[in-house]
Each structure stands twice: as C-alpha cells, then as structure tokens.
Image (tube, helix red, strand yellow):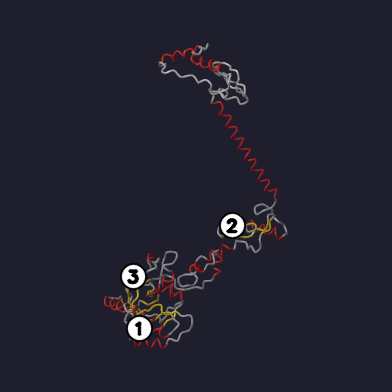
Amino acid sequence: MNSFDWLSHMGIPQVDNFDIVEIKFKGGRKEYYRNVDYLSLTTGDPVVVDVPSGHHIGYVSLQGELVRLQMQKRKIRDDDNILRIYRIANQKDLEKWEEAKNREIPTLYRCKQIVDELGLKMKMSDIEFQADNSKATFYYSAEERVDFRELIKILASEFKIRVEMRQISLRQEAGRIGGIGVCGRELCCSTWLVDFKNVSTSAARYQNLSLNPSKLSGQCGRLKCCLNYELDTYMDAIKDIPNVERPLQTEGGPAKLQKTDIFRKLMWFSYNNDNDWHSITCDRVREIQELNAKGIKVFNLQFNESSELEDLAAQSTRELELLDKKFATKKKKKKPRNKGKQAPVQNQTPQPQPQPQKPRQRAEAPAVPGQAPNPENRKKRNKNRRKPRPQAENPTVQAQPAAKKENQKPEGKRRFPPRRNQGPNSNKPGNE
C-alpha cells in the first residue's frame, strides 16, 4: 500500500491511541475517518465509511500516530467535519461494490461519445462509482472553462444516477491513470505523492541537466516532479562553486568554462574552444580570478609563472637521474655471478679464418676477340678430359678418388668429341 507504520513496534498504550484512520480509495485518493467504535483494524482491511450521500468502501492505509503527522502536513483539522467508519466490509458489501465498478468502463466510453457529439473541449479521464451504486464522479481535464450543464442532464437521464463533475490537472490525471516511469518504478503521483509542487526549468539548470523537453517531461506532459527531490542538496553544494561570468585570462589565451562537477569541486576549461579540457579546483579558479582582476595574466591554468613549470621539469629530471643511478648500481652487483663466462671484447678486430685450399687449374690462353678458336687446342682439351686427374698432395684429398673408384660403375657408351669445323670461319679455305 506504499505506506509503512514505522511506529508500530513502539508499544504505545491503547488509551492514548489516535482514533483517526487514513483510508485509500480508487486512484490514490486518501481521506481521513474517525474510528468511533474502536474497531480492530489492520492495514489493507476493507471498511465501509460514511459519505455525504450514502456509503462507500475503501481500504485502511495508515493508522496510529503517523496519521496525526499526516494531518498536520496536509493541514486538516481534527474537528466534527471528519466522518466516521461504519464497519468492516462483509462479503455482500464487496459483491455489490464489484457490480458498481463493472459499470465504470462502459460508462466512460459512452460519456466520451456524448462529449464529442456536444463538441465540448474537455477530456474525460476516469469515472468512480460509489459502493452503493447511487452516485458517480466524472473526472475530466480541460485547458479552458467548459459549460457542461447539458452534459450532466444527458448523463443523469441515461444512467439513472446522480452525476458529479470534478476537474483535475494533468498531473492528477496521470496519477489516476497510473503507469511506469523512466526509472522503472510506478509513478510517484499514483503511489505516495499527494501535493504537487511547482517545477521550473531552473531546477534542471542547477543540476547541470540538458534542457531537453523530451527527457525532462513526464507522462503528464509537464516537468517531472522528481526534479525537486535533490534540488536542495544541489543548492547547498553550489554555494562553494565560484561564479565564472568571463573567460579566465592566461598567456596561452582565454580559457572558457565547459563543465562543472558540483560535488567533486572541479571545473573544466578549454583554450579557444578546443576539444582538450583541463580540470582545476574551485580554489584555483578563485585565485586566477583575483589575479585577473588586478590585471595579471597567469602562465596557464596550473601555474602562475613559467619558472614554476621549469622548476617542476627540473625536479622531474632529478628524479629520473636518481632512478638511473639506482638501477646502475644494481647492474654492477650482478656482474660477479657469471664468472665462467667471458665477456666478448667489443673493440677487437676479427681475425681472418684459414680457408681450405682448392686444386690448381691449368691456365689457358685467353681467347682473342674477333678470332676463331683453334681446332688443335680443342683436340688437346678433349684428350685431357679422358686422362685421370693428378692426385693432390694433401692426404685428405687423396682418399677421396680411391673411394670414388670403388663405387664407380663401368662406363657405358663413350661420348663423342665435339665436331670439327664448328667455327664461324670453318667454310673458308685453309682451315681444313
């Protein structure tokens, strides 16, 4: 029932117990009735209550001392105007009330048809039948004043009941219809919210929200009520945020405010509307504003002068030098561990390695360009090819031909020597 009695375990004496009970009706409507007969009630019990023109049925939503606080909050006086509770509803009362509720939807459709026929500029939202089936309350919303006297006559004659017209706002209309919000929960106006406070766009500005109507408006078409929930917290946090009306003047150019984190006390600036944003604290922003008021430009958003940046760079280089010395001493300690290995000499020139000797080849006379090869020399070459080659003096080289002879197969057909008269001047006389 969206209500919890957090004082129920206090053990308050029954003599001093508050005798007024909060009753909930259709659409989240809550009213207060006096428990004159001191009935033993629990949250959720259906009870029959007194109304100006008969009786109605509602459910107990709250009782005890919390009801006194709720009445003070809603400014309701504890006087004789508060009606009484008759009894706890029995089965016969609930069946009769169920028959009356079944008439609500058909009556709503018929009422919309009549409104269209009369041409009235009004929107029918909901209908609530009384439990004794003698009265019906029609809830509507309209932007202008509507003359519905003719409508009441038609409805009373057609449905044979007493008609009451009640105009509601768009927020109350959304509360009666109900729904699920963007947060995934049921609408606040249809569960626990009773008083609707004014919501303005300044609440979204203080919370740094984008002024997008589709995101800021609820199902009723108005600004969301939850924009006021955290507004007080933001207003307290904004007191420590400096007001930046002009860009901050630096040697690198004017720095414009882009974003503010209210709870972390950080502000982002950019030079000449660049994409690179620089974050500084609110105290640093006040310091720069004071210097700019005196006509002094700071070096950048972090430092007032360039010497501070140079000192910071020198300090960082000193730290790097200390780290280099620290790791250099560690390397010297690791050298004695590798005693067996000899470090290679870097500056030593490499010595040429001895190459294996190749067997000598006979030198031949070079061919004279433009002169035909001599056929006698060819005969000598062919004869030398058939002869076995002389063995080399190296013993290792001598062992190789012997091994080859053992594995050598008998020669087959003898290769023919190259033909004579193959030179370019073979047809000339005197070359035979």
Q: Circle 1 sits on which residue?
A: 135
- Residue 38, by quadrant, is bottom left
Give the position of the C terminus as an image quadrant.
Answer: top right
Q: Position of residue 32 (x, y in %)?
A: 39, 76
Distance from disc 3 to disc 2, alpha carbons, whole Å, reads 52 Å
Q: Amino acid at mark 2?
A: Leu
Distance from disc 3 to disc 1, alpha carbons, whole Å, reads 28 Å
Number of numbered labels in the structure image: 3
Crowding around mark 3 (Cα neighbors within 10 Å: few <14, some 14 to 19, many 20+) is: few
Disc with the residue nearer the chain's start (2 vs 1): 1
For label 3, the SS is loop
Q: Position of residue 181 (x, y in %)?
A: 43, 67
What residue is at 65 percent from the left and 54 percent from the top? 301
The image shows residue 408, relative to residue 49, as above or below, that is above
Disc with the residue nearer the chain's start (3 vs 2): 3
Q: Amino acid at mark 3?
A: Thr
The numbered disc on residue 418 is none
Confirm or deny contact between disc 3 and disc 1 (CB under 8 A): no
Determine the residue located farthest toward the right in the rendered image: 295
The image shows residue 92, relative to residue 311, as above or below, that is below
For label 2, the SS is strand
- From the viewer's side, name the closer residue of 310 and 62: 310
- Residue 297, by quadrant, is bottom right
Give the position of the N terminus as an image quadrant.
Answer: bottom left
Confirm or deny contact between disc 2 and disc 1 (CB under 8 A): no
Q: Circle 3 sits on which residue?
A: 42
What residue is at 45 percent from the left and 87 percent from the top? 147
Crowding around mark 2 (Cα neighbors within 10 Å: few <14, some 14 to 19, many 20+) is: some
Determine the residue located farthest toward the left in the rendered image: 92
Q: Circle 2 sits on which residue?
A: 266
Q: Given this view, does label 3 or label 2 mark the residue nearer the observer?
A: 2
- Residue 375, by quadrant, is top right
